[in-house]
Amino acid sequence: MRAPLLRCFLPALALCQIPLSAPAARRLVECDLCIYGATSGGVAAAAQATRHGLRVALLDASHHLGGMSSSGLGATDKGTVESIGGIASEFYLRVARKYSPSATARVWLFEPKIASAVFAGLLTELSVVPMLGEPLATVRKTGTAIQEIETSTGLVVRAGMYLDTTYEGDLLAAAGVSYRIGREANALYNETKNGNLAPTTSPFTNLTVDPWLTPGNPASGLIAGISPGSPAPTGSGDALVQAYNYRLCLTKAANRIPIAPPPNYNAADYEMIGRFLTVKAAAGQIVDLGSFTNGIFHNINAADGFPGGKSDWNANKGMSSDRVGHSSEWPTASYARRAEIARDHENYIRGIFQFLRSDPRVPAVIKNEVGLWGLPADEYVNNNYWPPQLYVREARRMIGGLVLTEAHGRGTLTAPKPIALGSYAMDSHYCQRLAVSGKVQAEGGFFELPPNPWPIGYEAITPKAAECTNLLATFALSATHVAFSSARMEPVFMMTSHSAATAAALALAHQQTIQEVSYPELAAVLKSDGQILEWASSTT
């Protein structure tokens, strides 16, 4: 254990061990750092802060620990693995050692239950007791400083520093910090991929998938899954986010559980898939479940090295498990409404499987393949074997002291004061489907690899000083829709959270605001703890 940066007068979490069954009366917790969001980033921050001597409270509205990293995203969007350091690197090594205790190399494909065990084990080692099922209700501030937060169960947490590690940016929004939802206009930051994209960017451009209930008749109305209206001007901004889905952990093993159809299943909700398959069949093109070119899904199966005979299934192209056009309400929705939206996304995916099993337009090769897959009986046993975390790819994004842009991702601008590196592609899933010239057009997707890992600056995780002086945000960080589409990956989330916890420790040790933290001192501590802050072009 390294020497603490801040002397503690109470044992770590002595005040934070509150039973989940406690009554809804007002309960008080006092600590040094309050982390809201028990995601992968939240766990990383809690570990780093505790190792540096802080008393930590780790809370979440849900009952799930580890966010997407333990909810089906087992095929890591890793980018350049040499750029992944700190507790993120430690996590992937700990996962490897769950499979092989003597492992020295990190692994990037893993089962959800293994990730859950790693997160829980790390917190147990550090005596961190997460407080789950604590929806945020109130944030109380004095001037620019948060004094305490209160949850809907009556839990009050008072801390010197606060950290928002939610996917939605719920704490920063409640604290009055500026944020943006949706796509900026290209002109705002001199970008090229932001805002509405030209129809030619869609893989449906050369397909004649008719969008009308009665083919060829616009007066008949749109089939399900198509947004009304015409395309907006190219490059114009809006409030749309890239579509969400669930990353399904599936298996062909004997213990698989069939994917039940949703309540009130209606084949008409999947007419677009039926027409897509019909067009492909008429053109003599083979469609399968796993092909990037023609597939309904992209899956990574056991043959690709996925352990346990399982597969991380994700959306592929414009017609798959993404609930395109139905995710943009989520960022500012109430917790109750989010539960409804999550169930809608689940039912949509369940309906796809039912459609592929039963519709006469589905080729036998697909029907047979779908019938082989099911939900593993040893995953998510307390959640009806379904992933507990909706894949919230993008929600609120803070407007902080620095806004990361497309130029940062491309390496033509370099963010000052780096605290982590992004390296995955600038990758946005579709935001909407439209009827364009009598065809289905998916709009909003792009994928562009950066030339090198690129720096995420400290001021991208800190609010403006005039808005809040004791808060950091590490997923809903300050970036445009384009730059965020690279920075949103789970390894980066853990790294930014590691760095934020370190900055909080320094601010408390020196009785500073979060904006006053000495970057040279911060960088020195981060490097000593294994963070990678710079990238040399010669690095291999």
Image (tube, rainbow, N blue to C red):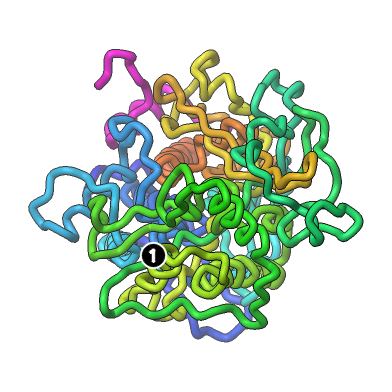
Q: Is residue 395 above or below residue 266?
A: above
The quarter of the displayed image where residue 532 is located? top left
Q: Is residue 38 above or below residue 108?
A: below
Residue 280 position, x and y percent, is 55, 50
Image side of residue 82 versus residue 370, left or right: left
The residue at 32%/16% (across/down) is: 536
Q: Residue at x 56, y 44 (%)?
A: 473
Residue 188 highlighted magenta (yes or no):
no
The verdict on residue 526 being magenta is: yes
Q: Residue at x 71, y 69 (%)?
A: 337
Query: Looking at the image, which is closer to me, 160 or 135?
Result: 135
Of 504 and 309, the residue lying toward us: 309
> To which quarter of the image does residue 422 belong?
top left
Crowd band around label 1 with a 10 angstrom C-alpha radius: few (<14), some (14–19), many (20+):
many
Q: Is residue 95 left or right of residue 201?
A: left
Which quadrant is home to the C terminus? top left
What residue is shown with label 1? 249
Viewed as shown, does residue 124 lie left or right of 322?
Answer: left
Which stretch appears magenta? 513-540
Q: Is residue 417 above or below residue 230?
A: above
Q: Position of residue 31 (x, y in %)?
A: 48, 59
Amino acid type at mark 1: Cys
Residue at disc 1, secondary structure:
strand
* Residue 332 % position (x, y): 73, 56
For the residue pair 212 and 290, the one nearer the viewer reads as: 212
**Residue ID at (28%, 42%):** 89
Work out whether residue 110 can be spotted: yes
For the residue pair 439 and 240, the one nearer the viewer reads as 439
Rendering coords of residue 205 (x, y %): 65, 37
